[in-house]
Image: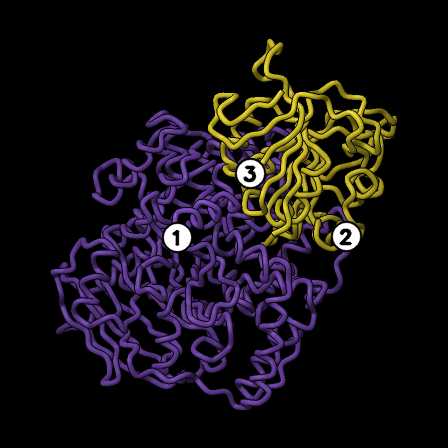
Amino acid sequence: MDKILRIDMGAKGGPKMTESPIGKYAGLGGRAMTSSIISAEVPPLCHALGQDNKLVIAPGLLTGSASVMSGRISIGCKSPLTGTIKESNSGGQAGIAMARRGYAAIVLEGKPEGSDLYKIVINSKGVSIKVDNSLKMLTNYDLIDKMKGEFGEKIACISIGPAGEMKMGAASIAVTDMEVRPSRHAGRGGVGAVMGSKGVKVIVFDTTDLKMRQPKDPDKFREANKKFTEGLKSHPVTGKGLPAYGTSVLTNILNEAGGYPTRNFKTGAFEGASAISGETIADLETKRGGVATHGCHTGCVIQCSGTYVDKNGKFISKQPEYETVWAHGGNCGISDLDAIAKIDFLDDTYGLDTIEMGVAIGVAMDAGVIQFGDAAGAIRLVNEVGKGTPLGRILGSGAEVTGKAFGVERIPVVKHQSIPAYDPRAVQGMGVTYATSTMGADHTVGYAVTANILKVGGFVDPLKPDGQVELSRNLQIATAAIDSTGMCLFIAFAVLDQPETFQALIDLLNAFYGLSLTADDVAALGKKVLTMERNFNMRAGFTAQHDRLPEYFSKIPLPPHNVTFKVKDEDLDKVFNF
Amino acid sequence: MKITRGGYGIRLPLVIYGSRMNGQKFPIVDGRSGTDLTKVRAQISPNMLSCFFPLFQQGITVEVETGCSVKELLCGQLGIDHAYLEERITTIFLNGKPIDDCATAVVVDGAVLALSAAMPGLVGAMLRKGGFYTAMRSAITYRTQSADSVRANGRIHLKLFNSIMGEAGPLILRRGIIIPRSKVMKLLSEMSAEILSGDMPTNGYNSADSDILLAVEILAS
């Protein structure tokens, strides 16, 4: 993984490819790689869909190795949805294939003239890029079926659906899973629209002759991998809760806490929560002959996914995860699991971020476009997005555009991106992260290993009133570092509680690269990434005034606890004081 | 009186005996039953336990002595092991508010108590009892009211989530839960080929949805 592939899609005479050594980007992976390239090479004030923006695809530092949980792939650009720098990451098989082909990054640059659509194929013979207009407006599932017909089953693909081609703000980039289904997505921030603006429909990796990346110190690596795996399997969350129930295991407890945003964030409790909980999904999948415990990429030992089937055992979608079930479920007043799974499939095949779409539909419901609880109506709206009707174009542009188009006051976004499945009035620490994240409202940016292990920024007293600001800061630093390793963020639950498991992660990195990193080095990497991202955003015109939640979160109490967001602006401004 | 399958409009291998449970041991709050509720005892096979899972998630009513701490209620009254409470039930809500100290949070009559194992994500970490991230959800944290600790017989609404359903559910069921007759019927209809015994009068009930005290033993697998 020592080279970078750049494809200038706007070159005269057609796309021009160059491969270069990794050079100044050596030692970087995942989010650290994408944010470094974007920060250094993209003019912050450029149009996100213009020729100066770049789409950077980067596996993590350990992706493609024998390390468990290391298959993530990061995709970065200037976001057309938020206007900020963006890193969105995904599971699936493409990161592993890309890393084993030796690519630390693929950078799509420039902008083609005309409307041709391109297909990039990477195999042992090299890279080819060809016009293939037969792919135009194919859904992701139809596209991958076509690619399998052309190249066989041993492929991994990165692709966009019609939403990406239409350059919608909610457009995602799909990554195929172990069953070669386009079910894993870099969902957030409209990264699919940037891929669409480059005229690239799909990148196909031939996986037939790939070899595992080898560590510098195999013995230490094997030992660290063993300890890391044992730590994950012995932890109650990664070893039991997630495998058994998936991420939707959160539904019941968020609902119980009164922090489950319901009907466009009007209340914090949904009467139909137990009908769409992880417990219910797992039970239904098992009874119907689906799969309740499954990984999204090779080497996953947590296995938080699954396969959702209908009452006849026929595939509907991969197991919808918590944010999806919430966005299209409780947030829209819908408790019909089959309908939610159907919408999940539609989002995947049209290439849409399930959070942005669910929140946009919730806003549309608030405006009276359809009624809350109207599952058939919600399916119809997602199909309108996929077809690109005028209403679909509005919805596909995200919750903020939808709210403005229909005159809705309550639009739950930060930096133009939809707020995920935790109401910041009930869970105020999450609100701090939503407000201040470099990515717009994002639940994953402050998600990972904890200050009490890393001690980034010094020890934090969690009982202090401003503890949540400090905790958010430290979590964002730590997450930025973990996002650079290629590790699934769900490792955080074990790392959070088990220092020896965190040490095993550092040992994995050291053994693989022949380094002697410490926890401080990991924290320094996280700070470096965040600093680059903040700097990019400042140069793009973002100020402290953008690090705020929508006004109504501070004014309108959230039942049942009737709380408002009370963190002061001056405290929010301290989050990045490091 | 013996009622056979179909006696209540449901197609079950149902056997119910017409006498009250005189002399039978029925573990309601250390013998302080004091209830006039109709009592039904059932035995089900382990694979039928999941029939109760929707009910556990929505909440079941149990008779307890209120005015005590969560810890006393769970361990002293419901029989949950102390170590299990400490290590496994890491997330507890009292009336929708996450609690940090089981020894000081007081359960009053009519309370809603929800029990969960450790949950994923930052929010999962925040909601854990006494965790490092409690400050991040301080707006909804449970705080003890000084007037709470008045001892009395009462009822609480108990919710069991995720792995707690399968692990602690049998203990709660054995002790007895109070549920409307209509829900008992629905549950029994789902538990085919199992024997149910107890006391369920066939007539004289005006309310089709009157409460029943249902105690369930899980047969050894």
Q: Closer to the observer: label 3 or label 2?
A: 3
The kind of residue on which mark 2 rests is Glu
Q: Quadrant of the C terminus of chain A?
A: bottom right
Label 3 to label 2: alpha-carbon separation:
35 Å
Q: Are marks 1 and 2 in contact (CB under 8 Å)?
A: no
Classed neighbour count for the residue bearing mark 3: other residues with Cα under 10 Å, few (<14), some (14–19), many (≥20): some
Q: Say whether marks 3 and 1 touch (CB < 8 Å).
A: no
Q: What percent of the width, then of the height, locates residue A424?
A: 58, 41
Q: Dot 2 surroundings within 10 Å: few (below 14), some, or many (20 or more)? A: few
Q: Chain of mark 3?
A: B
**Hey, what amino acid is under mark 1?**
Gly
Tell me the chain of label 2.
Answer: B
Residue at disc 3, secondary structure: loop
Which chain is purple in the rendering? A
Of marks 1 and 2, the one in the foreground: 1
Residue B54: quadrant of the picture: top right
Q: Colour of chain B?
A: yellow
Residue furthest front as drawn: B1
Q: Are marks 1 and 2 on the same chain?
A: no
Label drawn at residue A290: 1
- The chain holding disc 1 is A
- Name the residue located 52 percent from the left edge and 90 percent from the top edge: A216
Which amino acid lies under the numbered mark 3 shown in the image of this protein?
A: Glu
Question: Where residue B204 appears, x then y in whole percent?
Answer: 62, 10
Q: Which of labels 3 and 1 is toward the front?
A: 3
SS category of the residue bearing label 1: loop
Q: Is residue A135 left or right of residue A31?
A: left
Label 3 belongs to which residue? Answer: B194
Which residue is located at x 63 percent, y 34 percent?
Answer: B42
